[in-house]
Amino acid sequence: MKNIKPKYQKYPEYKDSGVEWLGEIPEEWEVEKGKWLFKKEERPIRPEDGIITCFRDGQVTLRSNRRIEGFTNALKEHGYQGIRKGDLVIHNMDAFAGAIGVSDSDGKSTPVYSVCTPRMKGQINSFFYAYFLRNLALTGFIESLAKGIRERSTDFRFNDFAKLLLPIPSFQEQTAIANFLDDKTAKIDRAVAQKEKLIALLKERKQIVIQNAVTKGLNPNVKLKDSGVEWIGEIPEHWEVKRLKYVANFKSGEMITSESIFKEGKYKVFGGGGFRGYSSEYTNEGNFVLIGRQGALCGNIKYANGKFWASEHAIVTYPKIKILTLYLGEILRMAKLGNLSQTAAQPGISISQIENVAIPTPVISEQKQIVEYIETQSSKIDKAISLQQKQIEKLKEYKTVLIDSAVTGKIKVLNRIKELTRRTR
């Protein structure tokens, strides 16, 4: 892990914590087992209690505050327990992935959660230890600990937490560190959200550029006509519209077993979702458009080139006329072939359905211009997206390093508390 930026001061002196995985801690800090800092609560539930969920991003809140879909609801609430605002909550099964935090609400939860409160009021700050434990989770320590205790299990139960030797800064320092991290991580999260929003806009821009090019061409002054196809709209007057059965032949790929797909090999294997692995044999050679034919990937568009194996989950497109692979693939993507499926439970499309879809077909010379334009513009946008993604990675890395450095005493934040907005905990 990279060193934190030098603008943060260190403590004057450090000592050996006596804990191998913790290393050195500030001289003034103590070390104690979790069971002497927190106790496990087992409260009864109340009629007015709503269900609380501990999410992997560390938020512990009423399910209704975040989302209500995608959860399994128990018919009978056996073993449910009460949670109060300010409780430290550990998801026994998901702690390894970061599902640890402080509840912002009163409510109830399943028995799979460990609900903890400080043994010593005014001496232990639950928010500090939530940051500390999540740091252990996100650095892989909790998962390694759990595997050492229980084979093939990543559970992190209260008994495991109780045995952990934890650092104990003064209560003032615990509060200062928690407030400092609240402020800094919120700013980092906002910066990440802004960049993610920009990436979404860039992707949307790229799709608009491609859609306009494959349906309108590159001449803004060309005379247009109604294509007669709703999803296409108007097209250049000199373009033709043809059903796909006159443009290409379509054939499902060949069956391949999971045992025949390897992590390494000579020929790539493509399914409806794209690359799956390698095979010792191939079914196709050249540049092709592949269409997903089943399930969630129904209508999905991918490209394959060279020698490769097309699996039974993909439909391979073999052009009959002069049409460039990229142009054909992008116009098929725009056609949203997945909408042809009539089954919601297990979506699927047939070749006969695809063959009746109509697409615009400009002459090959114009296709070449369109493809060159798409490749040039896509490259520019992809570079902009890549830059934003790299910046997001750096921000997330910095956030991880900052949290680790603060909760383990590598940096001293108490002197900076006046710079931050205090909040009552």
Image (cartoon, helix red, strand yellow):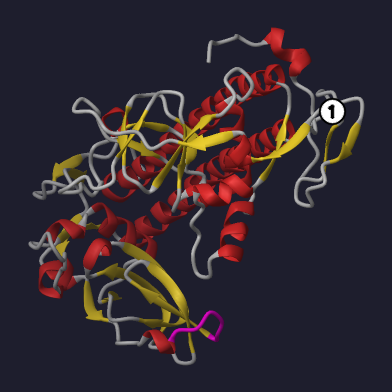
- Left or right: 417 with respect to 122? right
**Percent x, y of residue 142:** 59, 52
Query: Is residue 231 placed above or below 7 in the rendered structure?
Result: below
User: Residue 203, image x and y in percent?
Assistant: 42, 42
Q: Find out whether residue 264 is within the magenta segment.
A: yes
- The boundaries of the magenta stretch are 261-266
Residue nearer the viewer, 142 or 10? 142
Magenta-drawn stretch contains 140: no
The residue to which callout 1 is attached is 6
Residue 173 is left or right of residue 262, and the answer is: right
- Closer-to-camera residue (424/179): 424
Q: Is residue 9 above or below residue 319?
A: above
What element does badge 1 sit on? loop
> What is the crowding at mark 1: few (fewer than 14 residues within 10 Å), some, or many (at least 20)?
few
Residue 318 appearing in the image: yes
Q: Amino acid at mark 1?
A: Pro
Q: Is residue 151 above or below residue 413?
A: below
Is residue 122 shown left or right of residue 22? left
Residue in view at x 35 percent, y 38 percent: 53
Closer to the camera, 363 or 340?
340
Q: Residue at x 11, y 68 (%)?
A: 353
Residue at image location 14% in from the left, 72% down from the top: 350
- Estimate the x, y position of residue 150 in percent, counting from the top left: 53, 66
Residue 282 in the image: above or below residue 371: below
* Residue 37 place in picture, x, y as percent: 61, 33
**Residue at coordinates 36% horizontally, 55% vertically from top-left?**
366
Please give the count of numbered marks on the rendered protein. 1
In which quadrant of the rendered view does residue 326 lie?
bottom left
Q: Is residue 138 visible?
A: no
Q: Nearer the viewer, residue 257 or 81?
A: 81
